[in-house]
Amino acid sequence: MRQDQNSLSMQEPSALVQEYLNKVSIEEPLPADQVVSISQQVKQLLIEKNAVIVAHYYTDPLIQALAEETGGVVADSLEMARFGSKHSADTLIVAGVKFMGETAKILTPNKTVLMPTLEATCSLDVGCPADEFTAFCDQHPDRTVVVYANTSAKVKARADWVVTSSIAVDVVDHLDALGEKIIWAPDKYLGAYVEQQTGADMLMWNGSCIVHEEFKAKGITDLKEVHKDCAILVHPESPQSVVEIADVVGSTSQLIAAAKTLPQQRLIVATDQGIFYKMQQAVPDKELLIAPTGGSGATCRSCANCPWMGMNSLQNLLQCLQQGSGEITVDAEVAKLATTALDRMMNFKLAN
Ligand code: SF4
């Protein structure tokens, strides 16, 4: 992995991320009767407003269940984007983090896109400010700019390609075969994995996911010592030492697919534990174990739970339907530029 230290963010990404973490507020769990009452109100409003829930795997299982029951979707960010762009609803309720809402709005500008909270962001997004990233790219005009979906609309507008973790290796492999050198942003761990898989010439931004960064190889191998018959499933936003001990490395959708095909009955899963709702549905007879975030040096800021995904709740989901709050808007010029890079992502997936 190569990094141009002189060109990286002026402010340390961790300091920027901490600013946003200070604003996180998670609502208390609801009593069962309120869950039923709010769910019923949400179902009624979805019909009245011709709206549909587009939820990420990492959101509260109560939201995932509601999305499923009402004809919405629970998916990774690529499938969320595809579902929203094809659905006939007038309003998309995007339960996830802000870049997902922005992507939905860019791809479906004629729909209303609402989010339960606009405060839910992502350490990768906030650790890659658009102005600093643009300056970084301008210093390397010979490189093709590939950014992860976990970025702001403005960063996507500066990119040539947007990718998700499910297609990152394939896209970079494709560009490498064309002889293109790459700027990769913002996740340094996913970038290192893609570089190792493709052998492409990649210049990295110095970002990371605060959730996946906490997984520890030592803790996982200790757990595997106890359960010798298990398989280890790892999301590639995890550190290289964790990726190296994985039986399967993949995006959320790819990990759920692997859970079904792996012969092992016990799986250690290194990604946000919100995925367990859909993964357990896929493999009801298998035992799923959360990969430890402990081990030497752990700060356990996240413990396999994204604090921003956790800001989505039934209460604020209902509120955004009732009040039309949390509306996503994207500047028209930014959206136009970002559409080019996003369309490449959508079309690449379809063509491959
Ligand atoms: S889990 Fe990590 S990559 Fe996903 S939204 Fe949270 S901080 Fe961002």
Image: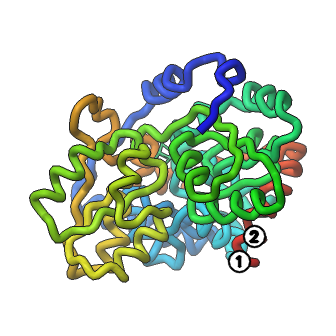
* Residue topped by disc 1: 352
Which residue is pictured at 59% across the width and 53% down the height? 194
What amino acid type is highlighted by mark number 1? Asn
Residue 330 sits in quarter = top right
How packed mark 1 is, by other alpha carbons closer than 10 Å (few <14, some 14-19, many 20 or more), is: few
The image shows residue 335, relative to residue 207, as above or below, that is below
The answer to whether residue 312 is left or right of residue 284 is right
The image shows residue 320, relative to residue 232, as above or below, that is above
The image shows residue 183, relative to residue 33, as above or below, that is above
> For the residues marked 2 and 1, what is the alpha-carbon distance in whole angstroms?
6 Å
Which residue is pictured at 44% across the width and 29% down the height? 21
Q: Could one spot residue 181 in this view of the protein?
A: yes
What amino acid type is highlighted by mark number 2? Phe
- Secondary structure of the residue carrying numbered label 1: loop
Q: Are marks 2 and 1 in contact (CB under 8 Å)?
A: yes
* Residue 247 percent location from the top left of the image: 35, 65
How packed mark 2 is, by other alpha carbons closer than 10 Å (few <14, some 14-19, many 20 or more), is: some
- Please tell me the numbered disc located at residue 348: 2
Which residue is pictured at 54% across the width and 66% down the height? 53
Which residue is pictured at 77% across the width and 54% down the height? 161
The image shows residue 21, relative to residue 32, as above or below, that is above
Check the picture and name the quadrant holding the N terminus. Answer: top right
* Residue 187 percent location from the top left of the image: 57, 42
The answer to whether residue 9 is left or right of residue 320 is right
